Image: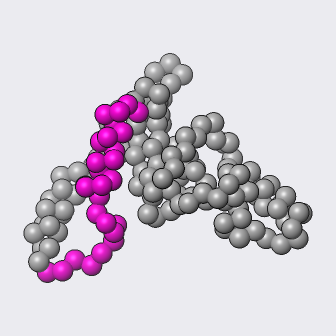
């Protein structure tokens, strides 16, 4: 298993990828495959990310590592910067969540014996229909999440 730690991603990832694609085309006279794009961008072959931990503000999907995050990637947001909040305890909580609390497959058909689970899920969604993740406020020049 490999863990990658990234920081200071470019603000315009799409443009950087476009320029890398152009450079690849100049060198090889063809468009790169997905695997070649990944290797060209990261400098080595990188498997799809199983999970991604993001600190500071919710920056949308543009904050995810390009080319290696997809539907199967589990995403976790930390309220404080990683150096402050990615402690042994928070990392253990994330690993526990990945191993025991997340479903094996994100989408599935519900057999009739799961009707009680569907009822509980509906109740949860009704109770939380007005919750919004990513709301924040400004403290000086800093943005922080409020819930």
Q: Foreground: 28 or 19?
A: 28
Q: Can you give x and y, in whole percent of width and height, for residue 98 in the image?
A: 33, 53
User: Is the C terminus in the top left, top right, bottom left or bottom right quadrant?
Assistant: top left
Q: Is residue 88 magenta?
A: yes
Give the percent coordinates (x, y) of residue 107.
Answer: 33, 71
Q: Would you identify the image quadrant in which residue 32 lies?
A: bottom right
Task: Give the percent coordinates (x, y) of residue 141.
Answer: 54, 22
Q: Does 108 sit left or right of 122 as displayed?
A: right
Q: Nearer the viewer, residue 71 or 140?
A: 71
Viewer-proximal residue among 25 and 43: 43
Q: Is residue 143 visible?
A: yes
Residue at figure coordinates x 51%, y 50% from the top left: 2
Q: Is residue 35 left or right of residue 127?
A: right
Q: Is residue 41 shown above or below 106? A: above
Tell me the magenta residue range. 86-112
Q: How many marks?
A: 0
Question: Can residue 132 be seen?
Answer: no
Please name the residue shown 40% across and 46% down the image. 76
Magenta-colored stretch includes residue 94: yes
Query: Residue 5 at x, y = what percent?
Result: 55, 40
Q: Is residue 62 above or below residue 105?
A: above
Q: Quadrant of residue 7?
A: top right
């Amino acid at each position: 298993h490999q863990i990658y730690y990234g920081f200071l991603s470019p603000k315009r990832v799409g443009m950087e990828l476009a320029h890398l694609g152009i450079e690849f085309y100049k060198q090889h006279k063809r468009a790169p495959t997905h695997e070649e794009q990944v290797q060209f961008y990261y400098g080595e072959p990188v498997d799809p990310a199983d999970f991604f931990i993001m600190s500071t503000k919710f920056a949308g999907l543009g904050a995810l590592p390009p080319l290696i995050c997809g539907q199967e990637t589990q995403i976790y947001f930390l309220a404080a910067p990683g150096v402050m909040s990615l402690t042994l305890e928070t990392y253990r909580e994330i690993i526990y969540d990945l191993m025991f609390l997340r479903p094996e497959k994100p989408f599935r058909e519900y057999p009739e014996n799961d009707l009680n689970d569907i009822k509980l899920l509906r109740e949860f969604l009704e109770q939380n229909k007005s919750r919004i993740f990513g709301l924040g406020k400004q403290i000086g020049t800093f943005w922080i999440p409020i819930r």
